[in-house]
Amino acid sequence: MPATLSVNVNKYALLRNSRGRNVPDLCWAIDLCVEAGARGITVHPRLDQRHVRLDDVPVVARHLRERHPGVELNIECEDHPTLIELVLAVRPAQCTLVPVRPGEVTSDHGWDPIADRERLLAASRPLRDAGVRVSCFADCAPDAVAAFAETGTDRVELYTGPYAWAWETPEQAVRTAEVWDTATAAVAAGLAVNAGHDLDRHNLAGLVGLPGLLEVSIGHAQIVRALEVGTHQSVRELLAALNPGAAPAP
């Protein structure tokens, strides 16, 4: 089964917010990504609302339901009650729980599945009861990932920042093995696998055939490449890198 590409549209929202109007429109950006072949859309609302705002989320969800019913919505968020309530109101296909450290520029670490077990259970229980698939952001740590099976999550999203930064450096082989060993351990524990953070059309090559991989979430690299070649081409390049040999998107 080919892995799904979920395009994170946060950076489109960041650009919009810098001007104070509705350009670019998130629904327009989503239409372009879906037309290019993306089968998932990711948003990551934060309480400081620095990119995707809280009131964007129901708009995006409604747009996908009405215009692109086969495209999954993935909402990334911390386990704050306000955000969990928002997810429950919207009921996306998936909620990816991501830990947040005050002052961080972007997500830069996974949960500790042992220390954070009760928090994750408390957040995942109502989500799963509402029919929302739960994924937890996880560091690439082969010896630790199996513990996520006790947190109520359905999947783990492997934090691929260190892997991506090591691409084409002497560390590449070590970091790649770390990702593969973690994915293998996750599957053995009964967990499905997502991946995300700093993935691009180049380093996706190291994840082709990754055990249990069902979805990758990509935002920053997609919009950076879109500045050169446009949104359609940037998405199609990611799809080709993720699933080489597959039929190109229409």
Image: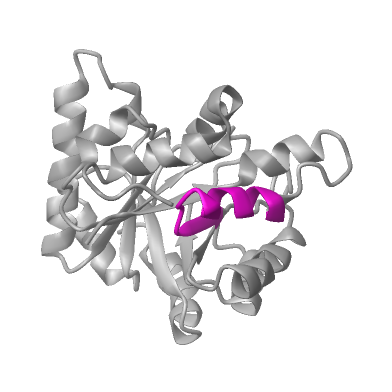
- For image coordinates 74% across by 53% down, the residue present is 53
Task: Please tell me in which quadrant of the rendered image residue 146 appears.
Answer: bottom left
Percent x, y for residue 153? 34, 69
Residue at the front extreme, as displayed: 250
Q: Is residue 77 at all visible to an observer of this figure? A: no
Query: The N terminus lies in which quarter of the figure?
Result: bottom left
Q: How many numbered tags mark residues here?
A: 0
User: Furthest residue to the right?
Assistant: 20
Asked if residue 200 lies left or right of residue 81, the reply is left
From the top left corner, tell me how far across and down residue 93 is, in percent.
48, 72
Q: Look at the picture and state if 98 lies above or below 108.
A: below
Q: Residue 134 in the image: x percent, y percent?
A: 41, 69
Residue 35 sits inside the magenta stretch: yes
Q: Which residues are magenta?
A: 27-42
Q: Residue at x 63, y 44 (%)?
A: 10
Q: Is residue 174 above or below residue 79?
A: above
In the image, what residue occupies the spot 29% across and 35% down?
Answer: 204
Q: Quadrant of residue 145?
A: bottom left
Does 9 appear in magenta? no
Nearer to the camera, 76 or 11: 11
Quarter where residue 147 is shown: bottom left
Q: Is residue 188 left or right of residue 139?
A: left
Quick one: which residue is furthest to the top in this view? Answer: 170
User: Is residue 223 shown left or right of residue 243?
Assistant: right
Horizontal and vertical percent for residue 88? 60, 77
Of residues 230 and 45, which is closer to you in this image?
A: 230
